[in-house]
Structure formats: structure tokens, C-alpha cells
Amino acid sequence: MAVPRGRGEVREEAILLATLELLAEVGYDRMTMDAVAARAHASKATIYRRWPGKPELVVAAVRRYAASPAAPPDESGDLRQDLLAVLLSMRAGLTGQDAALILGLMIAMRHDAELAAVVREQVVADKGEAFGAVIARAVARGELPETVDTALFVEISSAMLFSRLFLTGQPLDDAFIDHLIDDVLLPLLDHQARLR
């Protein structure tokens, strides 16, 4: 038997869904808190009690409905398997999102420092934490040095996934994920390990 949801949960869902709808329709810059309130049949006071501003509201909506955080995978004891698990999770998150919404959000981030800071803190950091956990485990096993540049590693991985999805339109299939791991990421890590 399903547990009935409270009024607060129903209201929050309406607000977040209205936010995503408006983002897709008019874009971040033209979306207003007034429009969200009208679409969700909520007061602005209700919205501001939960989210201090538009950036936080947008990030909450994207996190809830357009993306799932990239959680560190269960440890397999094998660096390649752990990398594969993170990349498959990232791929699932990216391909499950509305590409127009994400591109609009990325464009808006270039013009809104507050939005960019919130997205980086709350969305981008998840991917860094997932890769960071995998790298930390490999360091603990003695496979990698402590000096591995995890930030560069995350940036390269994300850039290649985004390029495929948004620029080239080529598939994010298993063959590409294997290529990314075997021909880019593992050689990069091996190179950094040899530099220690």
C-alpha cells in the first residue's frame, strides 16, 4: 500500500516540475519566480521559504527530475571495474536528461555567476566525489600515487561524455565507454603513476 504524500511534498513537486517546464519553455534568463509560483499554484513566499533564489530552485529541480547524483560504486577491488561503474552511472544520468534543458543551463551558467556557483557546488561536485572515491581506493591499494590529479581526470571524463552527447552526436555506447577507459583514462593514470 502506497504511503500518502503530505501537502508539503505535493507542493514541492508542483514547484519543481513547474520550474523544469518553464526552463524548457523560456530558458533560465526569462524564467521568473512569479511565473513558477503561478504555474505551480503556489505563493512566492512558499517558494522562498524553501529555496533562497532562482539558482537554488533550478538546481533542486534539475537534481530531482533531470539527474541522479553519481554515487561512488561499490568497491570491486579493480580500478577498471570501478571506473566503468562510475562512467555507466554518468552516462545513464546524461542520457536520461533533456539535452535542451542541460544545454540551456550550461549557457545560463556562463552569464550568471550565482547559478554557476550553485550548479558547480551541488551537481558537478557529485561527479568529482564519485571519481575521487574510486581514485582513493586505488591509492589505498597501491595502484596509484597520492599525487594523481583527480580534478583533471574528472574534467577529461566529463568533457568527453559531453562532447559525444551535445557536440558530435555520436553514441555513448559501451564501445565508447570501453575506449574512454582503456585508451584515455587508464593511460592517463598510468602516466601519472610513472611520474611519482
Image: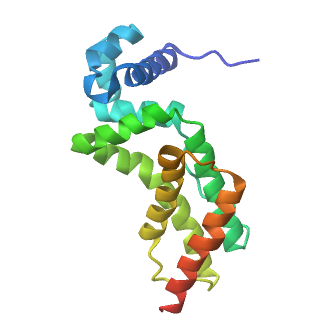
Q: Does 118 sit left or right of 96 as displayed?
A: left
Tell me the quarter of the image containing the N terminus.
Answer: top right
Report the number of discs: 0
Query: 99 or 34: nearer the eye?
Result: 99
The scheme the figure's colours follow is rainbow
Question: Does residue 163 appear anywhere in the picture?
Answer: yes
Q: Position of residue 179 (x, y in %)?
A: 65, 65
Query: What residue is drawn where x is 71% and y is 66%?
Result: 81
Q: Does 113 sit left or right of 90 as displayed?
A: left
Query: What residue is drawn where x is 39% and y is 7%?
Result: 41
Q: Does 77 sit left or right of 92 as displayed?
A: right
Q: Does 44 sit left or right of 144 as displayed?
A: left
Q: Position of residue 69 (x, y in %)?
A: 54, 46
Query: 89 or 44: nearer the eye?
Result: 89
Query: What residue is drawn where x is 30% and y is 35%?
Result: 55
Q: Position of residue 122 (x, y in %)?
A: 40, 46
Which residue is outermost to the right?
A: 1
Question: Does residue 73 appear anywhere in the picture?
Answer: no
Q: In the displayed structure, would residue 22 be above or below residue 39?
A: below
Corner quadrant of residue 94:
top right
Query: What residue is drawn where x is 73% and y is 67%?
Result: 76
Q: Position of residue 29 (x, y in %)?
A: 26, 28
